[in-house]
Image (cartoon, rainbow, N blue to C red):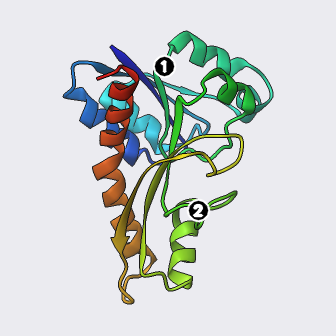
Amino acid sequence: MKRIVLFASGSGSNVENIVDYFQKKQKVTIVCVLTNNRNAKVIDRCNRLKINNLCFNKTAFSTTDCVLNILRDLKPDLIVLAGFLLKVPENIIQNFPHKIINIHPALLPKYGGKGMFGDHVHKAVKANNELETGITIHYVTKNYDEGAIIHQSKVEISSTDNVSAIAQKVHQLEYQYFPVIIERLLNKDHGE
């Protein structure tokens, strides 16, 4: 049985999509969702979906081994950042090399880095009159959005698309591809 731990900071729509996808699979389990935001809607989603969840503060995550020790106990095959906004500390990255992935709402290397998440990205894409945007699924390293790219998918943007329309197009790509790529990585790791 492959074990996934999810991290999220917000509404958890990607978390719910991933949970729904893997509920139909026999060989994968979502062991826990961790969040740094005690007011995040992802907690309500997890409770409704009967998924274990845990809230932690920034100190437990960034300056102690508290979250690292929790992860060690959970023994994940893959750690998935699904709308998680904190920078992953090096002690966690070093203990889970090539086991932590993130999804970014743009075609990296464009529109990446600190502060580039959610609507901040979509506003920048719109302001620069881009003709396309998309998603990038990548490995997490010590620098924001600089890890090796695993998968990218593109979508066209029309001049009439506002930030909300761009976000909706990107969300559709996230929902379509993120669970599939997670499954592919788990199978690859298993030699299937």
In this image, 144 relative to 162: left or right? right
- Residue at position x 56%, y 46% from top? 148
Task: State whether residue 71 is above or below residue 147.
Answer: above
Q: Are marks 2 and 1 in contact (CB under 8 Å)?
A: no
Image-quadrant location for residue 164 = bottom left
Q: Tell me the quadrant of the picture where the N terminus can be found.
A: top left
The reply, left or right, for residue 139 in relation to residue 1 is right
Hey, what amino acid is under mark 1? Pro
**Quadrant location of the C terminus?**
top left
Disc 2/disc 1 C-alpha distance (Å): 28 Å
Crowd rating for badge 1 (residues with CA inside 10 Å; few <14, some 14–19, many 20+): many
First reached walking from the N terminus: tag 2 or tag 1: 1
Residue flagged by tag 2: what amino acid is it? Pro
What residue is pinned by disc 1? 76
Q: Residue at label 2?
A: 109
Q: Is residue 56 above or below residue 136?
A: above
In the image, 26: left or right of 191? left
Residue 129 versus residue 84 in the image, above or below: below
Coordinates of residue 116 in the picture (x, y in percent):
62, 62
Tell me the SS state at disc 2. Answer: loop
Q: Secondary structure at mark 1?
A: loop
Residue 152 position in % (x across, y down): 41, 56
Q: Residue furthest left?
A: 24
x and y, in percent, of residue 3 in the image: 40, 19
Label 2 crowd bin: few (<14), some (14–19), many (20+), radius 10 Å = few
Point out the residue furthest to the right here: 63
Residue found at the very far top of the displayed protein: 73
Q: Nearer the viewer, residue 149 or 28?
A: 149
